[in-house]
Image (spheres, grey):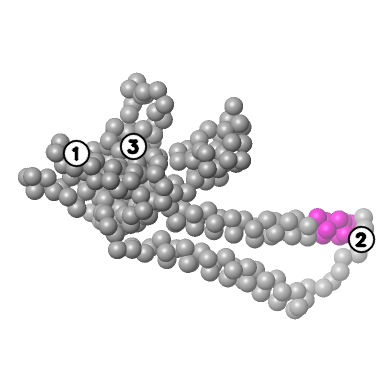
Amino acid sequence: MWYLSVAMCVLTPSLAFADAAQPWQLSFQDPATPIMQGIIDLHHDIMFFLVFIIVFVMWMMMRTMYHFHHSRNPMPEKIVHGTTIEVAWTVTPSLILVAIAIPSFALLYSMDEIVDPAITLKAIGHQWYWTYEYSDYTTSDEESLVYDSYMIPDDDLEQGQLRLLEVDNRVVLPVNTHVRVIVTAADVLHSWAVPSLGVKCDAVPGRLNQASFYIQREGVFYGQCSELCGVNHGFMPIVVEAVQLDDYLSWVANKLEDA
Ligand code: CUA
């Protein structure tokens, strides 16, 4: 009954967020950060132009094929130049491109911006799991908070867990906080990607890449490695659990105690 759930999501968007890939999914997962909202808005902006262009080009082609069919137009015209139309069909598309470029660049540069982060998370890609490091905190033996995150194999799944998406140790982060994520890899290229957060950051061995996000609602956000990294590329998912700041702090305290 997927169409019922689609209808539910469309009619009552606040009741059920799509924070993981869904069967028969069309379009984006629901945004949880301003950046992802911006990406979706830009997509809609561009689709507006796209629809007009497709309709206009189709209409021109249909008209041309109709009026210049050999049965209606047996003697072809000998015109090879028309300055006015040539200027028009050069200037108009360039204006459309400018109208697309302005919001596009604004979004691109805002994604690049790192706003004075309160928390730094380090994600390290391995064949085939992620290691997470919270270097803002240290345990009693001066180690930072580090743990591995593996996919739950099919046989160990519990009721309600998402196949190929759930992990044993999730990333926990607070809502309404500027978070910086530093991404790297220990062996080959990976990519740390979470659609609802609007983050897709390549994990390159020997290099630190940086992304940032500001999660606006609580939830569990699912993502996957997004760079072909070997046979288990499809089996190193990412799960980000966004909680209130209090819950985040007690989670950190517990983790530090365990370590
Ligand atoms: Cu790691 Cu694909």
Secondary structure type for disc 1: helix
Marking on residue 142:
none
> The disc labelled 2 sits on which kind of residue?
Pro
Q: Local crowd at mark 1 within 10 Å, few (<14), some, or many (≥20)?
A: few
Residue 184 percent across, percent down from the top left: 27, 51
Residue 195 percent across, percent down from the top left: 44, 46
Q: Residue at x 42, y 26 (%)?
A: 160
Looking at the image, residue 30 sits to the left or right of residue 114; the answer is: right
Q: Residue at x 16, y 42 (%)?
A: 256
Marking on residue 74:
2
Looking at the image, residue 97 sits to the left or right of residue 205; the answer is: right
Disc 2 to disc 1: CB gap under 8 Å: no
Quick check: is the Cβ at mark 3 less than 8 Å away from ligand 1? yes
Q: Quadrant of the C terminus?
A: top left
Q: Upstream in the sequence, badge 2 or badge 1?
A: 2
- State the residue position of label 1: 254
Q: Residue at x 12, y 45 (%)?
A: 139
- State the residue position of label 3: 236
Q: Upstream in the sequence, badge 2 or badge 3?
A: 2
Circle 2 or circle 3, nearest the eye: 3
